[in-house]
Amino acid sequence: MSVDPTSDVTIAELVGNLPNSEDSFDVTYMSKPEEGEFEFDQLEQDIYEFGHSVGEEPYHQGSFFVYEANREEQKYKFTAHVNMTSQDSVARFPQMMYESILKTAT
């Protein structure tokens, strides 16, 4: 999700550029908050609840929160919320978004 109204890159585009996006990711989109209404604590709670709704560990690799994605200005900002029950997610999960940004930006 993105909270920056000036973003000219869609979340679907970033997801499509993740490595092996069609085979490796089951994407769930969360609604984006209106400008000025973002609550980080609520995002954290939504991620926690989603992770436990999946059913078995590891629940998921993690979640991305994209708060700026602007191709014209070449600004890409995101946070990666990593699932610590997955041994590989700490190293690999953020790297996947870095790769997606490089594909998107060029």
Image (tube, helix red, strand yellow):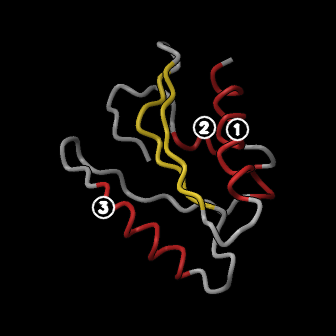
Q: Is residue 38 left or right of residue 70?
A: left
Q: Secondary structure at mark 1?
A: loop
The x and y percentages for residue 105 are: 63, 21
Q: Are marks 3 and 1 in contact (CB under 8 Å)?
A: no
The x and y percentages for residue 96 are: 71, 43
The x and y percentages for residue 43 are: 36, 60
Amino acid type for the residue under numbered disc 1: Asn
Task: Name which of mark 3 and mark 1 comes first in the sequence.
Answer: 1
Quadrant containing the C terminus is: top right
**Marking on residue 13:** 2
Q: Are marks 1 and 2 in contact (CB under 8 Å)?
A: yes
Residue at the (75%, 66%) spot, across then down: 87
Q: CA distance from mark 2 to mark 3?
A: 26 Å
Vertical side of 103 occupied by 22: above or below: below
Task: Name which of mark 2 and mark 3 comes first in the sequence.
Answer: 2
Q: Which of labels 2 and 3 is toward the front?
A: 3
Q: CA distance from mark 3 to mark 1?
A: 28 Å
Q: Secondary structure at mark 3?
A: helix
Residue at the (31%, 55%) spot, across then down: 40
Q: Is residue 62 left or right of residue 99?
A: left
> Which residue bears the numbered disc 3?
41
Q: Is residue 94 left or right of residue 36?
A: right
Vertical side of 60 occupied by 102: above or below: above
Residue at the (69%, 26%) spot, across then down: 102
Q: Residues within 10 Å of mark 2 (few under 14, many from 20)?
A: few
